Amino acid sequence: MMGSLKNHRGEQVPVSVEVLVSLNHFLRMIEVTIEFIFIEEKLVLYYFKDNERPSIHPIILFKMMFIGYLYGIRSERQLAQELEANVAYRCFLGLSFMDKVSHHSRISFNRRTSFLHTMIFEDIFDEIVRQAIEH
């Protein structure tokens, strides 16, 4: 006899993204290896304290772009969709299931204009590589 088909998609259960991501997931290994706090210190001059709308936190912004680079996601639109759906990405960014992911246009705007004519991407990349080598 065949069992009944059940649909549990609407069932609400108390669970965090933390418990759903394996401890040996690649992004978890990066997180214990790299201290990303330096990004905030490097970008303090680029963020305005009295802006009309809240900005993407610099560590989250660069972690988003880091995910795109690591997983070959070249489109900000696709990146935003992947960040919405992937539990491991949410865990790496420190987002819960209830947190909204920034709109792809905000990711794109920051990447293309906020740091134009600066060496900030290279500085951050160099520091990540330095920490990885040191570890």
Image (cartoon, grey):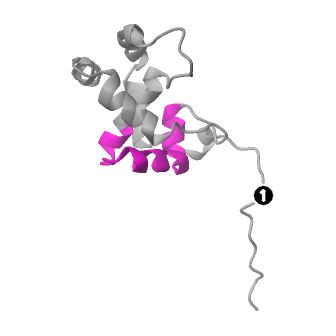
At 52% from the left and 8% from the top, the residue drawn is: 49
Foreground residue among 93 and 33: 93
* Quarter assignment of residue 7: bottom right
Residue 30 visible here: no
Q: Is residue 87 magenta?
A: yes
At 30% from the left and 31% from the top, the residue drawn is: 112
Q: Please, what is the three-letter code of the amino acid marked with disc 1? A: Glu
Which segment is the magenta one?
A: 67-93
At 50% from the left and 33% from the top, the residue drawn is: 93
At 28% from the left and 25% from the top, the residue drawn is: 132
Q: Does residue 132 lie above or below 37 as drawn?
A: below
Q: Does residue 93 lie above or below 21 as drawn?
A: above
Q: Which residue is mark 1?
A: 11
- Across and down, in percent, residue 32 comes to 43, 27
* Quarter assignment of residue 91: top right
Q: How many marks?
A: 1
Q: Is residue 70 magenta?
A: yes
- Label 1 SS: loop
- Across and down, in percent, residue 111 comes to 33, 30
